[in-house]
Image (cartoon, rainbow, N blue to C red):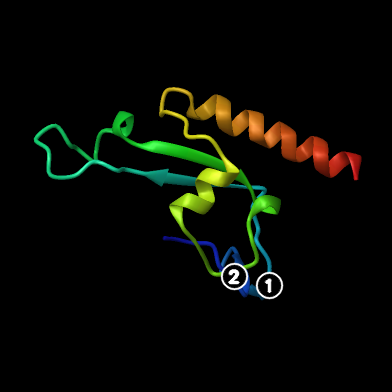
Amino acid sequence: MFGIARPTGRYEGAIWVAGEGRFADIYLFAWHGGWDEPEVDQRDSTQWDYYVVATSDLPHQKTIALSGVRRRATATSSRNLLVAVRTKGKQVRTTFNSS
């Protein structure tokens, strides 16, 4: 389970600013599915799957299961992560600017 609750505010420097909402355009989820194997090393970024999801695609709830993340995004590797983030960022900006 991943926490996706909408925060009740944010810090701007040292000042707390109240106001509910998600303050990012995209969320990055990371999943390491390996266990009980000698080759498993969670410090190795190539062993993780990464999922880039637009904030607007997240449900209004406090948590989301891996299956819910997988319905919203395709896994990408650490090698392709920068491209995936940039691509999703462009999609989000295009959607926002056209509405």
The quadrant of the image that shows the C terminus is: top right
Looking at the image, do the residues carrying marks 1 and 2 touch, with CB atoms under 8 Å apart?
yes
Residue at screen point 9% across, 35% down? 38
Q: Which residue is mark 2?
A: 7
For the residues labelled 1 and 2, the Cα–Cα distance comes to 6 Å
Q: Position of residue 67 (x, y in %)?
A: 47, 51
Callout 2 environment at 10 Å: few (<14), some (14 to 19), or many (20+)?
few
Please say if 5 is above or below 70. Answer: below
Q: Position of residue 86 (x, y in %)?
A: 62, 30
Q: Position of residue 53 (x, y in %)?
A: 59, 44
Please say if 69 is above or below 98. Answer: below
Mark nearer the N terminus (1 vs 2): 2
Residue at screen point 32% across, 33% down? 45
Which quadrant of the figure has residue 2?
bottom left
Q: Which residue is mark 1?
A: 20
Secondary structure found at label 2: loop
Which quadrant of the figure has residue 92?
top right
